[in-house]
Amino acid sequence: MQNKRSSLIIEQHVFPSPNPNIRMYLVTYLSAGLKVKGLLAEPNDQKYHDGFLYLRGGIKNVGMVRPARIGQFAAEGFIVFAPFYRGNRGGEGHEDFGGDDRADAYYGFDVLLEHPRVKNNVHIFGFSRGGIMALSTAVARPKAASVVTWGGVSDLALTYKEREDLRRMMKRVVGGSPAKFPERYKERTPLYQLEFMKSPVLIIHGVKDQNVSFEHALRLEKGLIAHEKKVETWYFPEYTHYFPPARNRRIVRDLCKWMKQHGRTC
């Protein structure tokens, strides 16, 4: 197998892996002309695997990519790439919560698509704020094999309404409130782009979630059904934004199995 890498990757350095069966690399790649950082994890073999684009939640250091989490998905038989988003860990530019930084996800998808050991499928996963990133990427990259959003934001104006603690940040990165700039919030909200969705979607959400309310999941489900898109829901009445570790691990295995079932064959 040829030892080459994506044309978008500028630098790639070995990164300490918490799992001896998984190789990890700190990657610098090009996103709309910016040098952005991310973490790449690969099973330590010479086999072909599906690609897995991991789109983190939060902003800046809050919700930053964790090697152990990335390793979990790689251990399920995926080649995983997790962008840090622009402006983080030495990357160029400024993160803006689902605005121009969506390009970092789009080009992250392309990094996996060009990976020499990713043969057929690239799946997309988004957690929390990563839900916006994941859904937008699936629209921008219709070759996506599947999309999973876990506790994911689907409506940015709803997040502004619900999360008083985030309003100052959102006014700064978006430019104002939804009342002042409704079109800016609409442009960052994938609910208005679902007609262009080609990939099957799995929605995972805790009904008691107070970080990203269950309403986000319901609105996304309703929108996908209205556009006659493929959607499956795993709702958990007893859980919040964060699931107990044992259940979390089981759901990781289950969602990875779901992704592989929705992959495209040769």
Image (cartoon, rainbow, N blue to C red):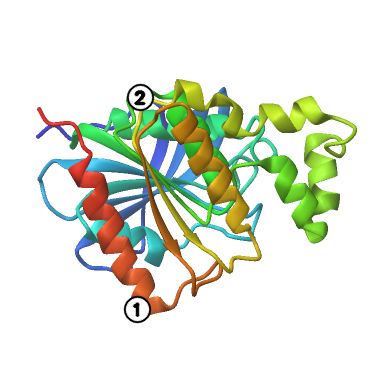
Which residue is drawn at the image coordinates 13% and 41% (left, top)? 48
Task: Give the amino acid at mark 2.
Answer: Ser
- Position in image of residue 97 (x %, y %): 67, 42
Give the mark nearer the N terminus: 2 vs 1.
Answer: 2
Residue type at mark 1? Ala
Q: Residue at x 79, y 36 (%)?
A: 174
| Figure disc tally | 2
Residue 34 higher or lower than 203, as above or below: above
Foreground label between 2 and 1:
1
Observer-nearest of 242 and 102: 242
Against 110, is 17 above or below?
below
Question: Is residue 42 something one can see in this rendering?
Answer: yes
Residue 232, compared with residue 174, is above or below; it is below
> Between residues 33 and 166, which one lies in front from this camera angle?
166
Depth check: 73 or 243 in front? 243
Q: Where's the N terminus, which quadrant?
A: top left
The picture quadrant where one finds residue 133 is: top right
Q: Is residue 93 left or right of residue 36?
A: right
Q: CA distance from mark 2 to mark 1?
A: 39 Å
Residue position marked by numbered label 1 in the rendering: 246
Q: What percent of the width, then of the height, locates residue 242?
A: 52, 70
Residue that appears at 28% across and 40% down: 51
How many C-alpha atoms fall within 10 Å of the one at disc 1: few (<14), some, or many (≥20)? Answer: few
Q: Is residue 105 visible?
A: no
Is residue 257 toward the left or the right of residue 160 in the image? left
Vertical relation: 95 (above or below) 10? below
User: Which residue carries the number 2 mark?
Assistant: 7
Task: Say which quarter of the image contains residue 171.
Answer: top right
> The C terminus appears in which quarter of the rendering?
top left
> Whole-percent x and y of residue 211?
65, 62
Q: Secondary structure at mark 2?
A: loop
Q: Position of residue 192 (x, y in %)?
A: 60, 27
